[in-house]
Amino acid sequence: MSDETPRGPIRETPAADGPPPPGVPRHYETHAPQLRDGSGSGAFGTGILAALGLAASFVMIEAFALLVVLVVSSGPGIITIATWVGLLVLAIGFGVAMIVSKRLPRAARTSFWAMTIVCLASSLIVLVGLCGMKVPRIGG
């Protein structure tokens, strides 16, 4: 059993229509919670998203450039040409990253550069993997 005393029935009176008269406090009003703006991901997220967008665009440019080199060129030096074109695109991407970094808020720059270095390293690994392997009928 319970030691609590039984409560009486709850009686509510409805609120009057319209705003209360001046000087009377408001009753029975509920306020909607303030929602966060979903577009603001903070400085850390802004830097990472900027780096990932930049990396995605330059990966597509580099893939297209390497494909063009492989289709247009022929002969024993094709892998050397593809490697230099890939490194040129990476250098241009690094230059664009410096420009983008200047336009980001100061708090977002650390995460931007951290993710940019990760993306550049992974792109170099793929470039070495593609251009460094021995492909039959390409490059001798």
Image: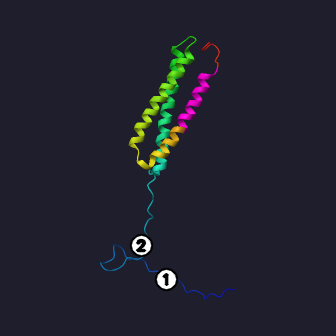
Sequence order check, earlier mark of 1 and 2: 1
Residue at (57% x, 27% y) in the render? 127
Q: What is the total number of numbered labels drawn onto the structure image?
A: 2
Question: What residue appears at the point 42 percent right and 72 percent down from the top-left corner?
Answer: 29
Which secondary structure lies at badge 1? loop
Front position in the image: 19 or 38: 38
* Circle 2: element type: loop
Q: Amino acid at mark 2?
A: Glu
Looking at the image, which residue is at 48% across and 31% down?
A: 58
Task: Tell me residue 60's x, y (percent).
Answer: 50, 29
Viewer-side label of 1, 2: 2
- Colouring of the image: rainbow
> Is 121 within the magenta?
yes
Q: Position of 64 compared to 135: left or right?
A: left
Q: Quadrant of residue 96?
A: top left
Q: Quadrant of the N terminus?
A: bottom right
Q: Nearer the viewer, residue 42 or 35?
A: 42
Residue matched to label 2: 29
Instruction: Give the answer, above or below, for where 98 lies relative to 23.
Output: above
Where is residue 123 shown, x and y percent of the image?
A: 55, 32
Residue 12 in the image: x percent, y percent?
47, 80
Q: Residue furthest top?
A: 75
Report the magenta residues as a range: 118-133
Residue 16: quadrant of the picture: bottom left
Classify mark 1: residues with Cα within 10 Å, few (<14), some (14-19) or many (20+): few
**Please, what is the three-letter code of the amino acid marked with disc 1?**
Arg
Disc 1 target residue: 11
- Which residue is most to the left? 22
